[in-house]
Each structure stands twice: as structure tokens, then as C-alpha cells.
Amino acid sequence: MLAMDNVTLSYHSQRKSFDHGSHHVLDGVSLKVYEGETLGIIGRNGVGKSTLLGLMAGILAPTSGTVYQRPGKTASLLTLGLGFRPDLSGRNNAMLAAMLQGSTQKQALGYLEEIKEFSDLGDSFEEPVKTYSSGMRARLGFTTALKTHVDILLIDEVLSVGDAQFREKAAAAMSSRIRGDQTVVFVSHSENQISKICSRAVCLHKGRILAEGDPDEVLSAYGEVVA
Amino acid sequence: MNLIPPTGSHLMSLPQYFRLMDTMARMSLQADASRYFFGYVWWLLEPLLFVGVFYVVFDLILDSRRADFLVFLMCGKLTFIWFSKSVNQASNSIVSNRGLIARINITKSLFPMAVIQEGLYRQMAVFALLVGFLLTSGYSASWAWLYLVPVILVNYLMIIACAFAGACLVCIVRDFGMFISLGMTFLLFTSGVFWDVRELGDPHKTEMVLALNPLAFMLDAYRQILMHATAPDWTHLLQIAAGAIVVLAIMVILMRRFSQYLALRALS
């Protein structure tokens, strides 16, 4: 589905501050994502996990190396706090997200009621996203990605937010997508989630792949790094 | 497995591109209108207030000595606002949509185009107001007003070319936003918005202003058509159109080629 060959990415923040999270480096990363698998990516903060997803989505280009993707396939990155226009309502944001992912206007309109219902947003669905709490934004973002079609779903830490009830519902819906033919790349700090959801895992450390393969073996390598 | 390196930006069909652009523009207009008590009335109220301010300063206080100053001012100011507002807002559009850019690999020109489309909808209402004002001010409708069609089209091309260039520059170095705002103020004073480029006294100077500043030529063309039922200088208009198309083509190629670089700059 997607392959990375000796990919390096380096850039510097204009603000010269790590607080803005804009200094990430990947160094000679090679990996493959197979159709229908759920690949977990684990690593400490700042090791380049989110940058790796950005490269997989084709949003960023590597400084060197190549990212290969299957022609015509769409990838969407689901990440916290991004992807919305705050001045637009939840409904319009969901519509826009679906159309940006390649849906026609008619298809996008067809998704809206389902998204409204699953996200439990009620009347807030018609309100501007700037009035939402972070949990509400996460619910809208997760549901939009879940209910609209993308070939590769790239999830960045998003399953760990929202209230307990929504988390449970989201995890169940996610599992059902994973059991189907959805290709998922999943970034998390939660060893439990990686072990439970993923069929394969990668541990990133200082911009390089430290371990790759069976989730439990990768998690034990991660455990040694954080110890 | 049949895998290829990415092409730079997510490919979408032209109908899909224009539908998305139009949807984004309509949503933005809707959100904008819902923010204010007067809603859609601001489409006309805002430009009219600008005209009002200029009228008070340049006619009532400074005495323009033109009987038709209000019509003259409206023809210039209402069309200038279309250009300046569209280019200004579109220049910031890639940066202000970084939330969407961080999520999906998408053609970056979509963002300035959506802003330009939004401006076009507003401007259609403004043009209707302008024509209505002319008719109620004693001007009669003329076949020559049809010359407005190519002039508006070239003006639209100019806006897209400048907006694409501005959006890329601001995305790469944010400071360009300041230069663009300053540039619009410079154009406001040098394009004959509230003074007549044909009354400079020196024909060479008039020629020079019209040749060096395409916007001055465009504002003059609007006035010639609407106030004097006179055709614009077609050669000059074509030259401006050709220039705008060349800049536009270069910007489209650059935006496609460097789509991911622009994403990196918008996000960092």
C-alpha cells in the first residue's frame, strides 16, 4: 500500500523553540505498510512519529529518500486540534473534510446525519467549531474520518480523548473497521492500545527505527528505551 | 505491489476542484454573515461606507471640483476594493488553512481560489449596486456597458495571478503579508481611485501611470465604459490579460511542484 525507502526529513522552526513542536528529524527510515493491516507506531515525544504520518499522507516531502504510494489512493491524517476551520459549523467542517477526501457533494451530504449521530454532538453540530471543547473536536474529527472513505487512515493519538463512553464507542467502531479491509497506521503512547489493536508495530527512537515486527516484541524494545 | 513516488499534490479532477472551491466560498460567506447582526447587508454596506468616507474627505472637505465625483469615486473605489480585499485575504489563505493542510495532501491553490470566489460573489452584488446607482443618477444603460464583460474577466485574472503569488510568498516568509498590505495602500494612492489619471496635466505622465500600473488602467477602463460609454484600449487590455495568464501559469506550476514544501512552510 505504501513504502518508505531510506527517508530523512529535517527542518528547523523559525521561532527556534521546541515548544511549538516544529523541530522534527527522521533519519534513514525504511518501512512498508501493507493493505488491510493496522500498523502501530510507538516512541517517546519528539522522535518523529507525527512527521512520519505527515510523510505517509503525502503532506510533507522527505529531505532525502522516497515515499512510494499506490496511485489513486487517498490517505487522511486524523490528529488532535487540526483539520478544522473554526469559523465553520461542525456540519460544514464534516462536509468539507469528506469532500477534501474525494467524496462528491452528494456522497458528503449523505454522510452528515450519520456523523452527527455517532459524534453525539446534537445541536452543537450546527454551531461553529470554535465553540467546541477539545473533546467535542476530537469526536467530530474521529467520526468524520471514520464515516467517510479513505484508503489509509492515519491516526495520531486521537483515541485517547473524549469521555469514557465515546472512547469505548470509538474503539469498538475502530476495531470493526480494522477487522474489515481498512489500512490503518496508528500512533500512540499507550502500550495497551498498540498491543490490543495493531497487527504489527514499529518503535521509533531518535528519528530511526529501533524495532519493527510483532507488537509485543516491539513494546518490550520500547520499554527498554523508556526505562 | 505497484507503487509510485508521489506527484507533489493530491490530484483531483477539475470539476471536483471547482465544486470544492465553490463549497468553501459559500460556507465562508455563510459563516461570515452569521457573525454579524446585519449579515449579508455588509456585502454592500462595507464598500458603501468606504465610498462615504472618501466622499466626505475628497469632495466635502477638499472639494474635488467634479460634479460627478460620487459616480467617479464609486466606479474607482468599488472596483479597487474587489482587487485589494481579494488579494489581501487570499495571500493569507494557505497559512490560515494550515489545519486542513496538516491533514490531507491537497492542491494549495484551492485556498486562495476559494477566497477569490467568495470575493467574486460579493462583487457581483456590488456591480449590481453600481449599475443601479448609475441608472438612478441620470446615466442611461448603453450597449457599451457590455465591454464590462472582458474588463471584469481580465480584472479577475489579475486578482488570481496576484493572489497566487501573494499566497505563496506569505506562506514561505510571513513578513510578505506586511509588504502586501503596504502595497495595497500604495496602489490605493497611485491607481486613480479618487483622482483622475486623465487630468494629470501632462499626457506623458498619464501614459506612464497607465502603462506602469495595470490597476490604474483597469479603474480608468471601468469609468470610460460606465460613465462615457467608451471602449477600453483593447491592446492594453490584452497585454494585461497576457501578463496575468503568464504569472498565473507559472504560479500554478510552482504550487503543484512545491506543494509539500508549501505545506512544510505553512506548518512550521
Image (cartoon, rainbow, N blue to C red):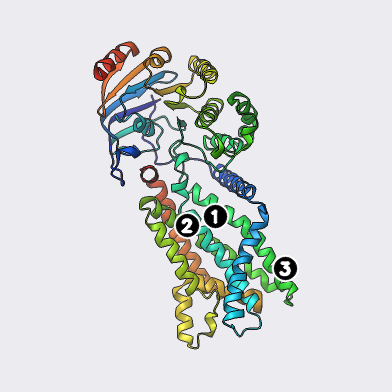
The residue indicated by pointer 3 is B132
Residue situated in front as seen by the camera: B15 or A143: A143
Q: Does residue A200 sit above or below A1 in this rendering?
A: above
Question: Within 10 angstroms of label 2, few (less than 14), some, or many (20 or more) residues?
Answer: many
Circle 1: is it few (<14), some (14-19), or many (20+) Cα within 10 Å?
many
Give the chain letter at badge 2: B
Q: Which mark sits nearer the N-terminus, 3 or 2?
A: 3
Please report whichever mark, 1 or 2, sits nearer to the chain's N-terminal start: 1
Distance from disc 3 to disc 2, alpha carbons, whole Å, reads: 29 Å
The subunit letter for the residue under badge 3 reads B
Q: Position of residue B243 (x, y in %)?
A: 45, 65
Circles 3 and 2, Cβ within 8 Å, touching? The answer is no
The subunit letter for the residue under badge 1 reads B
Which residue is pictured at 47% across the width and 74% down the height?
A: B190
Who is closer to the viewer here, A77 or A132? A132
Kind of residue indicated by mark 2: Ala
- What amino acid type should be assigned to the residue bearing mark 1? Ile
Circle 2 sits in a helix, a strand or a loop, which is it?
A: helix
The answer as to whether the residues below labels 1 and 2 share one chain is yes
Tell me whether marks 3 and 1 sit on the same chain: yes
- Mark 2, residue position: B163
Element type at mark 1: helix
Q: How far is mark 1 from mark 2, CA to CA?
A: 8 Å
Mark 1 = which residue? B116
| Residue at the image point whose x is 67% and y is 60% from the top | B125
**Mark before the other along the chain sequence, 3 or 1:** 1
Task: Give x and y (percent) for residue B160.
Answer: 50, 57
